[in-house]
Image (cartoon, rainbow, N blue to C red):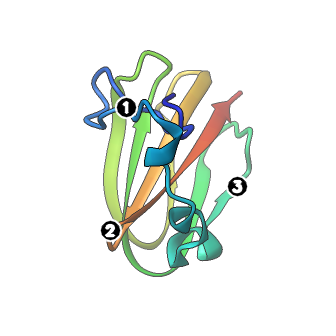
Amino acid sequence: MDVCNICSGGNTGITPKTDISQCTTTSIHNSLSTGLKIYPNPYENDIHVEVAEGEFTVVVYNTSGLEVLRGTFTKAADLGANLAQGIYMMRIEQNGNSATQKVIKK
């Protein structure tokens, strides 16, 4: 996690920010995060990801920062059934906006 609380570095493909002034508050209130639903969390079988509308991409990283799942979906997706029990960082991207959420598989 960088200073903006974003999973970065390693194999994530995201360059870590090192100065708090590099963080933006506008991304927290973008259209993606206001219509985003991720549940249940923690989950046992599938986790449901839903956006208000349109196509979105989900990228899931393990605690080592390795990408373990990636997919593009329209409006909603049920995923994560094949992941081992553990803690993951889920990044949802849509129209240049992104949101990151910690998810736990029981």
Q: Position of residue 15 (x, y in %)?
A: 29, 34
Tell me where residue 85 appears, x and y as whole percent: 61, 21
Residue 80 in view: no
Helix or strand or loop: what does disc 1 sit on? loop
Is disc 1 surrounded by few (<14), some (14 to 19) or many (20+) residues within 10 Å? some
In screen coordinates, is 2 left or right of 38?
Answer: left
Label pair 1/2, CB-CB below 8 angstroms: no
Judged by depth in the image, the label closer to the viewer, 1 or 2, is 1
Closer to us: mark 1 or mark 3? 1
Residue 100: % across, % down: 53, 48
Relative vertical location of residue 38 with respect to residue 16 in this rendering, above or below: below
Residue type, label 3: Tyr
Mark 1 and mark 3 in contact? Answer it, CB < 8 Å. no
Q: Which mark, by number, is residue 96? A: 2
Q: Which residue is mark 3?
A: 39
Q: Looking at the picture, which amino acid does disc 1 mark?
A: Pro
Quadrant location of residue 36? Answer: bottom right
Q: Residues within 10 Å of mark 2 (few under 14, many from 20)?
A: few
Above or below 20: residue 93: below
Q: CA distance from mark 2 to mark 3?
A: 23 Å
Query: Could you say which is closer to the camera, residue 99 or residue 38?
Result: 99
Instruction: Report how far apart the C-alphas of labels 1 and 3 lie in the structure.
Output: 27 Å
Q: What residue sits 60% from the left and 71% below the top?
A: 29
| Residue assigned mark 1 | 16
In the rendered structure, which amino acid carries the disc numbered 2? Gly
Quadrant of the snapshot with the C terminus: top right
Q: SS of the residue at dot 3?
A: strand
Residue beneath the point at 36% across and 38% down: 69
Please state which of residues 70 and 45 is positioned toward the viewer in this rendering: 70
Callout 2: SS: loop
Q: Residue at x 51, y 28 (%)?
A: 1
